[in-house]
Amino acid sequence: MHPSSFEYFAPARMEEALSLLSKHSGEAKIMAGGQSLIPLLKLRIASFPYVVDISRIEGMDQIKEERGFLEIGALTKISELEDSNIIKDKYQILHEAATQIADPLVRNRGTVGGNISHADPSNDIPAVVIAMKAKLEVIGRKEKRTLNADSFITDSFSTALEEGEILSKILIPIPDTRSGGCYIKQKKSAGDFSIAAIAVQMTLGDDYKVRSAGIGLTSVAPKPTRAVKAEQYIEGKRVDNSVAKEISKIVVSESDPSTDFYGTAEFKKKILGRIAEDAINLSYERAMVK
Amino acid sequence: MSTTKIKTRINGKQIESEVEPRKLLVHFLREDLGLTGTHIGCDTSNCGACTVLVDGKAIKSCTMLAVQADGKEVTSIEGISKDDELHPLQKAFLEKHGLQCGYCTSGMILTSLWLLRKNKNPTEEEIRKSLSGNLCRCTGYQRIVESVMYGAQLMIEKEAEEHEMVMR
Amino acid sequence: MNMSTVRWEDSDLAYDSSNFVRGKGHFVDDIKLQGMLFMTVLRSPYARARILSLKGGMNSQDLGAKMASVGEGADPGAGISIEPVFATGFVNYVGEPVAAVFAEDRYKSTDLLESVEVDYEPLKPVVTMDDALAFGPIHEGMKNNILVEATKGDDFSDPKSPIVLEDTLENERVSTNPIEPRGIVASYADGILNVWISTQSVHSIKEGLVESLNLNPDNVRVMQADTGGAFGSKGGLYPEYVMASYASMKYRKPVKWIETRREHLTSTNPGRGVRSRVKIFAERSGKITGMKGDVLIDAGAYGSGIASFSAQFVAMMMTGPYSIEKAFVTGRSLLTNKVPQGPYRGAGRPEASFFIERMVDLLADEVNKDPADVRLLNTSDKPFNSPLGMKIDAARPFFESAIKELEYRKEAKMTKGVGVSFFVLVPAVYPGESARIMVRDGRIRVWLGGNSHGQGHEDFVKKLVNEELNVPGDLVTLYRGDTGMTKVGVGSWGSRSAIVAGAAVVSVCRKLKKDVEDDNGTYSYELLLAGSYDEFINEEKRMTLNSFGANLASVEVGKFGTVRVKKCLAYYDVGRALNKEMVIGQIQGGMAQGIGQTLHEGLFYNEDGQLITSSISDAGVPLAEDLPNFGVKIAENRSALPHGAKGVGESPTIGVPTALIRAIEKASGLRLRKTPVTAEDLMQ
């Protein structure tokens, strides 16, 4: 209930944040909305000598379409994503994920960047950015670099961020016409983490065959997972029930769930199979009408 | 033990304080400022007994550090009514039996207030969804939902009255 | 709140629910006293281990006391298995208190946990009831893990019966999870130990502290803080209360302890945790001719909660509202390396009802009859004394009207997934309750031996005082429980308050009326209020009351194994409803808990005895989104008491799970034997 002591910094500028991280290298923790970090500090599951609160850095909370990308600042609150008209109208997959994260109060503080960087295999945004083939912009003291969403999270609670780097924005390629996607999450009760969840995004060609697809999975492996084989299988095909069924089998084969409080591995695979089928069908349907 | 200076506006009052960075906003409100209407019911950000408004948005004050409230405006249950007059939502919860033990009530009212400021006339489903970060163990929620609906009506009526007063 | 001089005039002790909407309640954590220390408890990380060495904090070397068993279902005869205040020699469950540390604020107090050094030698724990039967005793000096064994009824040899059905049925442990966790402030000054506490019974707490710490009862005063829900878990003594009281005497400073939710899950007595093998004998018509049961109670590590009482209590109620002529039930409470079991809303009643109702549904399927008809067939239109020791009023007339009021026949025609349940609630009337009324300065002040924590005691008190004495309700104030104001008293549990506290209020009112008449030759409320009176009664009651009830549930089971509750209805005999709105509110809240137990709630332990349920959300407390609107109808068949009340608080946790699980069984086509029913159970 009561965190251990730490020193706290709330820099207003990125450079300042980076220099603090470098000064306290190895001992500093980045905090954005704190909705995952503060519970860990409270229960003393984790403690850090220094906490660098980046939430006051300006200009990192915008949602805009620019130069072919939907750009989401890492400090954008989940609730801002949820309320954004651009997201509601054009990125249903993101809207659906955002509205199902934790509860409205947590979404009022939690950030998109935090949801990704915390690298909890049950967090929802990672699967979505994987499915949307997003690029993640990362700023360090020396350089700014971009990483592919599917290589950002390396393991449970681990990312490709180097010591002292900060995730600054998420760049999602603006989908072509005839694109559609969705996020389906199955949970025990409202507000829970998922038993399994899936993000699917696809673009169809003029012939209504799938031109490209992205599939990301939540809670069914030690890290958010890209279902690469399923993506390959679907490309070049028109989706009907039998294709969706086949894909769902491949998706399940690419998962690696463990038995835990949320259910047995076998149960999670069953759930995943069913939501995968639904998600493929729904995404295809949405892509057809766009 | 180092402390940090923060300036906050709590229930309309400008406050300067020295706090330990590790202190949670809920403890700052309850222990440093004596605002004990904000409660603590869990340690995993589930129950919402600690809900307050920060810059108008409902948040869990057990999952925010007091230092993070620097420069921000905080409204707790004690700040939603003036003097002895109850806020329409407070009236509604009393009249419609939206509480039994009373422990979750502050949080329920503040989350509902945030909802009703965004959405004056929510449906039952919208209310239930909005309350998914607030747990009640006594009522089964039905009376809480009814209280929020009734509160919405009272707030609309009050706004209309105030509007009329201004027009006159 | 100024502490050493709390007097009855202090408005802080008045119970006023309008405080809560203003954030002006007086919960125990709101109390701030000069020089107060905050206590934090170091708890066992092991389900079972030998303590090899222990240094630091306050521990069993400072306080070798044992827990007094008090409160609902208390059994002082738990012998070797009485819980120590601090673990002594061994730890026997994850979360068992080992040491306590004290500092001027809660952050520093938590920091101090690191100053305690403990070496453990982990031992293989006895986690499940099967383990308890299979392995040697968890406590040295015991022969086995059977805490108590009871039998009800006379044994009989299996009759030659056209139908014999047998099944094993189970309720998982459930955490009570009031939104306010437990807490206490203890302050010792001028030879008096003052205690403020979140509780269902100030008298149990006082009795417990007096016994555990060997104190003079005249020097202990226990006062109830506003209590943020309890549901059974705040009726008795806990180790932390003894520690905090002892520490306040030792350090001569006020001491506060507030439970965290994590502690609540690991260390507050949870309810349910029962299993029974049940066998019924019946005719082809569906008439049950006999039943046998073998009930197992998962007592946890010590006999400090309700576990030793549960064995015989559950056994006694196993025939439900039905006229079953032959019955024999054994009950055994088994020691396991888990937190001791305690009462949870119903405290044995829902368990017994679950066993008989599940069997009746099975029987209905076997004889291919409507379950409601099989139920009716087995009720009587005359009072019935069950072979297990229950006195049942004529049950059939009520259930016939219940079928109509719930519109069961129509629902059963329309919906596949429908279930109906019958039950009889026998409230905990014995040994009665106390009440005190003081008339001063034109106002009426009332104290009860048991205290309100949201059930609306203040409403029935006002109503009864008004009826008996004509005093307007706004001149009547109910005060929170206070052993300084009532010499003796019992507590709020077992659906008893409106019955026994209500009866005590009526009796005190009648005394007051007589006092006024003696003084003035006549009675008027003006004369009463102009005078100065103070009357107390400890009214003993022994009668058996019956509150019949029936529930209907209808559901849909989705392809992910999720259950959508479409309808959840109740028809309960509540006696005379002293405040209809409060009664309905109570029922709705209990129905939510009934749904919770059936679909979501449980405490799950791994093979090492570690609790894997790690939050209130994991424990399954339902959210607004998880629940339907409830349909509640009440029948008001007055009891024989002057004010006509019966019990109601526990009815919904008895009747909802049984109706709901049947509805799910019908919708899914799967025979269901335990709660909670998970999506995984239903996924096909």
Image (spheres, coloured by chain):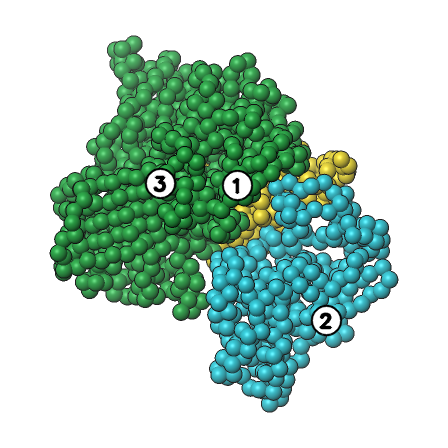
Tell me the residue that label 3 is attached to. C146
Q: Is residue C647 visible?
A: no
Q: Are marks 1 and 2 on the same chain?
A: no
The chain ID associated with circle 3 is: C
Q: What is chain A's hue in the picture?
A: cyan
Q: Is residue A176 left or right of residue C550?
A: right
Q: Is residue A231 left or right of residue C661?
A: right
Q: Which chain is yellow?
A: B
Front-most of residues C355 and C411: C355
Q: Is residue C209 left or right of residue C385?
A: right
* Residue C214 horizontal/vertical position (percent): 46, 19
Q: Secondary structure at mark 1?
A: strand
Please say if A82 is above or below B62.
Answer: below
* Residue B92 horizontal/vertical position (percent): 47, 43
Tell me the residue that label 1 is attached to. C49
Q: Which chain is green?
A: C
Considering the image in quadrants, where does the C terminus of chain C appear? Answer: bottom left
Q: Residue at x 51, y 44 (%)?
A: C123
Q: Are marks 2 and 3 on the same chain?
A: no
Quarter holding residue C143: top left
Look at label 3 and name its amino acid. Ile
The chain ID associated with circle 2 is: A
Query: Closer to the N terminus: mark 1 or mark 3?
Result: 1
The chain ID associated with circle 1 is: C
Q: Is residue B9 visible?
A: yes
* Residue B162 horizontal/vertical position (percent): 57, 45
Q: Gap between marks 1 and 2, in whole Å?
A: 49 Å
